[in-house]
Amino acid sequence: DLVKYSSGVITSSDTGKEYLSALYDAPGEKIITIPPGVDTRLFRNIPMQEAKKRIGAESDHHIILAVGRIDPVKGFDVLLVALKMLLLRDPSLSDKVCLWIVGGDVGQNQNQWSRELTKLDQLRKTLHLSATVKFVPPQPQEELPYYYNAADVLVMPSHYESFGMVALEAIACGTQVIATDVTGISPILKELPRGHIVSANNPIALAGQIMEVLTNLPQKNTVHESMKKFDWITIAGRIAREYERVIRL
């Protein structure tokens, strides 16, 4: 009923627009897609070595980063398998590449870890990746830019994401991003020079994509001009204009 009687609906992605039309019979002309905005004053380019020092990372390591709550839908198990495949394809990377997963409550006794975090830890041991994969507690917003800038690539291997805000934050820092094709942000990533798309639940393809990114690293992280349209002020202006349009109806 909310969709039926509303004067307009704002969704964060074209995927959401399709769901609204299919599941709630929302007329296409009533729906407008406006992505979330990112605070580009906070999520900005920071020299990689400065960022690595801040988070306590080795200066010569290539960091593969994943950020998000520890939940099966995030596909972190697929990422662990992809990492194992990557190292089997190129054993020389074993001492150079590490995976940091930020978002798990690892500060408490390990016996009190969540079921999903425990499963990931067991998989890490089974794959002999204990020295390569690091679980990091959730970080405040002010610290996340250092993690993004310390990483060579952010991977979002989700089985589903309504949008995928961490990808936008990472790109605002100049970091390359690999996301699955079931995320709301995937159509946007296709248009951004630092975005890469891979099929969901496909560790073989994901390993290949990570390999491609790591073997073609840019000399310096740069933020593309197109990110300006995702700045908070720009996005807020679009939302405000949509409110004004509805008021005039």
Image (cartoon, grey):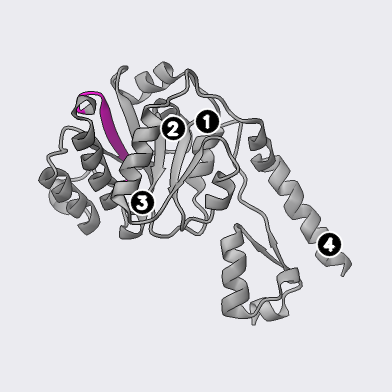
Image quarter of residue 217:
top left
- Residue under label 2, please give it: 148
Which numbered disc flags the more N-terminal residue, 3 or 4?
A: 3
Residue at the extreme right of the image, as rendered: 248
Q: Amino acid at mark 1?
A: Cys
Sort mark 3 into few (<14), some (14-19) or many (20+) by Cα contacts within 10 Å. Answer: some
Q: Secondary structure at mark 2?
A: helix
Q: Secondary structure at mark 1?
A: loop
Q: Which residue lies at the image location 26% right of the left edge and 31% below the top edge?
A: 98
**Residue 82 lies within the magenta run:** no
Q: Check if mark 2's residue and mark 1's residue have beta carbons within 8 Å.
A: yes
In this picture, which residue range is highlighted in magenta?
94-103
In the drawing, what numbered circle is on residue 245? Answer: 4
Q: Amino acid at mark 2?
A: Tyr
Which numbered disc flags the more N-terminal residue, 1 or 3?
A: 3
Q: Which residue lies at the image location 87% right of the left edge and 70% below the top edge?
A: 249
